[in-house]
Amino acid sequence: MTRTGFQFAYLQPLFTDVKRLRGEGAYRQLPAPQPSSSLATDDAPLGAYAASTLIRTSYSAGVAHVDAFRRLVEAGEADPQSPWTLMRGALENFATALWLLGGCDRTERRRRALALWREDMRNRAQHEEDINHVPGPGGKTGRERRQDVEDLALTLGIPTASLGRPEAGKIIEKAARDAGLPAREVTAAWRAASGFSHGRYWPNLRASMPVDAVRGGPDHYLMALVIDETQHRPFTRHTRHLLQRLHNRYEARAMPRGPDCQPRTSGGIIMLRALALYWPPPSAGVLRPSPRRVPVVRAAAPG
């Protein structure tokens, strides 16, 4: 088969959005919520466990993933896996931030934030135990802080039973649906990307394109694979849509713009006061990545 070039023009709108967020040695952060905003009101009783902290951290992580992918593409080093794994990191983080911002019920938003903080502290406790970390004077372990989160939830009338571990798939599905995206299509692409991230076999069959095959032994072939752009293109489009939606929702919730969940807008895309984002048309370009060979066993490979 003839190897085809990586037509990366469809990536340029998202790359341009994120490139404009690069500052001197760091990415521009989302601004802290204004004191009289809806988000600041959500945060008020949460203290150190504010929702806005998680939202801003997720946003920055998503931006960093996209920018890492942009630099990889511009260096001519894209491969069949990295476009999926890096875009997955971006989409998952943007969706998480939107999920934390979502809903018109203040108690539900606080519950989501505390559930994520509780999981955060569970992961932190595991790491502390792995490295035998002992807090300094006045410090607390992840386990102790996890208990603090549970105690705080109870003071707000949020039962501990409702703080179950947040599931990434459900968060993405909810965020996609709230953003007007086809939720099943978004989660399906995310699952393929997660498969690539964890070295699973099946995404090679479902989200890559074979361009060559050679016999690797008496019972198997080695297949050269390249990224299937027809599947990665909508994944990129959904990621950009979530980023734009996140900008809009954060502006509405973090600025004193009107009644809770009824932001006043002047039409068009809302621009954050701390950011300057533009949406230019894509520019064309072709990149030819090196294909990756994976074994295909005729008798045992799943279809």
Image (tube, rainbow, N blue to C red):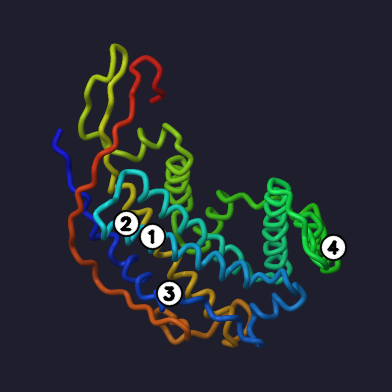
Whether tag 2 and tag 1 are in contact, CB under 8 A, the answer is yes
Three-letter residue code for mark 1:
Ala
Among the two numbered marks 4 and 2 on one chain, the one whose residue lies closer to the N terminus:
2
Residue identified by numbered label 3: 25
- Density class for disc 4 (Cα within 10 Å; few <14, some 14-19, many ≥20) is some
In which quadrant is the C terminus drawn?
top left
Whether tag 4 and tag 3 are in contact, CB under 8 A, the answer is no
State how far apart marks 4 and 2 are (Cα): 45 Å
State how far apart marks 3 and 2 are (Cα): 18 Å
- Residue 15 image offset from top left, x and y in percent: 33, 66
- Residue 53 image offset from top left, x and y in percent: 63, 71
Side (left or right) of 147 relative to 185: right
State how far apart marks 4 and 3 are (Cα): 39 Å
Among the 4 quarters of the image, the one containing residue 36? bottom right
State how far apart marks 2 and 1 are (Cα): 6 Å
The mark found on residue 68 in the picture is: 1
- Residue 25 image offset from top left, x and y in percent: 43, 74
The nearer-to-camera label among 4 and 1 is 1
State how far apart marks 1 and 3 are (Cα): 14 Å
Mark 2, secondary structure of its residue: helix
Mark 4, secondary structure of its residue: helix
* Relative vertical location of residue 185 with respect to residue 201 in this rendering, above or below: below
Residue identified by numbered label 2: 72
The mark found on residue 151 in the picture is: 4
The nearer-to-camera label among 4 and 2 is 2
Among the 4 quarters of the image, the one containing residue 278? bottom left
Three-letter residue code for mark 4:
Asp
Three-letter residue code for mark 3:
Gly
Mark 1, secondary structure of its residue: helix
